[in-house]
Image (tube, rainbow, N blue to C red):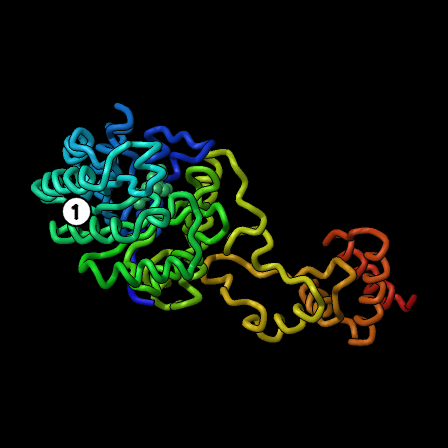
Amino acid sequence: VNNFSIIESTLREGEQFANAFFDTNKKIEIAKALDEFGVEYIELTSPAASEQSRLDCQAICKLGLKAKILTHIRCHMDDAKIAVETGVDGVDVVIGTSSYLREFSHGKDMDYIANKATEVINFVKSKGIEVRFSSEDSFRSDLVDLLSIYRTVDKLGVNRVGIADTVGCANPRQVYELVRTLRGVVSCDIECHFHNDTGCAIANAYAALEAGATHIDTSILGIGERNGITPLGGLIARMYTADKDYIKSKYKLHMLRDLENLVADAVDVQVPFNNYITGYCAFTHKAGIHAKAILNNPSTYEILKPEDFGMTRYVNICHRLTGWNAVKNRVEQLGLSLTDDQVKTITAKIKELSDIRPLKMEDVDNLLRDYHSAIISGDE
Ligand code: HCA
Ligand code: CU
């Protein structure tokens, strides 16, 4: 996979999440954290949405962040005029091209779209800032219409065209094909935006990059309209697996957990237990066979190195699937000395007890300590 950039949309798409309300200070806190993490772009809610949205956009532009600041507008001159006055580095323009949106949303035909796009793009470019043109609901749009509008805007000199799976219907193979086709039609960069209604948002982003896309939209924890879009952390996990050194050189991976906690807190949700990288069990190993191999060489059952993300591995021995190698490791951590045969005996005891009821770490540690004392005092 080639180089790519993240367009982080927690402060735009993320604001469309059911629970989201970010006041100015929270937006600034999130923008600074994203910038520090290293995302290349931060996308903000349209300044045409409300007066406060406009003021917040201006305030974030004034922070002097390394990340480029974008705002996101409808393909309309009224919005464009407001957007270019906010101090943003670029404007992401979007209009629906599928028959659904043309019929049930804005009611315009493809000629109207091409004319409006030309007007808006020329205007934004005349202000010397970046412009991207994207078609909402790309995967349910007519391919001929779609390629024709992208060709038109590419000739106008847009920085990027965008593909959006607005309803989350696309699969990785369809994404690969569409991006591949588009790659042959435009010379500008290609941005992709994937909703996660059917669980393909990360895989689709990866397929897009393989096919020649250059920019991926994300949000922290994937928050967005309905069940959201490609999550930042999940995309990082995927791309780290493809090219660890590249990802480690671009982003401060240790910040991911704090970034997610910050946003989870702000929108009043928990980080999911099975979240990529930071979920509470992401580096927990349980079965005896796994635990033994992990203790010999973590890569046997870990594709992500927890230490690269400031996380720690945990080998759970408090259950009936445990094995004596894992128990021996815990015995050593507790500074107890037992022979292998003794460890095997106490492992059998742990299995026996955990057949009856779930055990806690404390219970097991006490069991190990008591067994050890009994041996020392000659009772066993
Ligand atoms: C929406 C718009 C959008 C825009 C994506 C883009 C989508 O429906 O709220 O600008 O590329 O999913 O189509 O988020
Ligand atoms: Cu979206």
Q: In this picture, is 23 found above or below 209?
A: above
Question: Is residue 165 in view from this perspective?
Answer: yes
Residue 109: give x, y in percent of width and height.
Answer: 23, 38
Question: Is residue 38 in view from this perspective?
Answer: no
Disc 1 residue type (three-letter) = Glu
Q: Which residue is drawn at 50% across and 49% down?
A: 198
Mark 1 CB within 8 Å of ligand 1: no
- Residue pushed farthest right? 379
Q: Quadrant of ligand 2?
A: top left
In terms of image quadrants, where is residue 76?
top left
Which one is in front, 188 or 147?
A: 147
Image quadrant holding the N terminus, namely: bottom left
Q: How many labels does the image show?
A: 1
Instruction: Quickly name the residue at label 1.
Output: 130
Residue 38: give x, y in percent of width and height.
Answer: 32, 53
In terms of image quadrants, where is residue 123?
top left
Q: Which residue is drawn at 54% across and 40% down?
A: 270
Q: Residue at x 51, y 61 (%)?
A: 306
Residue 212: give x, y in percent of width and height.
Answer: 29, 63
How crowded pointer 1 is (Cα within 10 Å; few <14, some 14-19, many 20+) is rated as many
Left of 69 or right of it: where is 165?
right
Residue 358: give x, y in percent of width and height.
Answer: 78, 51
Image quadrant holding the C terminus, namely: bottom right
- Residue pushed farthest left? 126
Q: Residue at x 19, y 57 (%)?
A: 188
In terms of image quadrants, where is residue 72?
top left
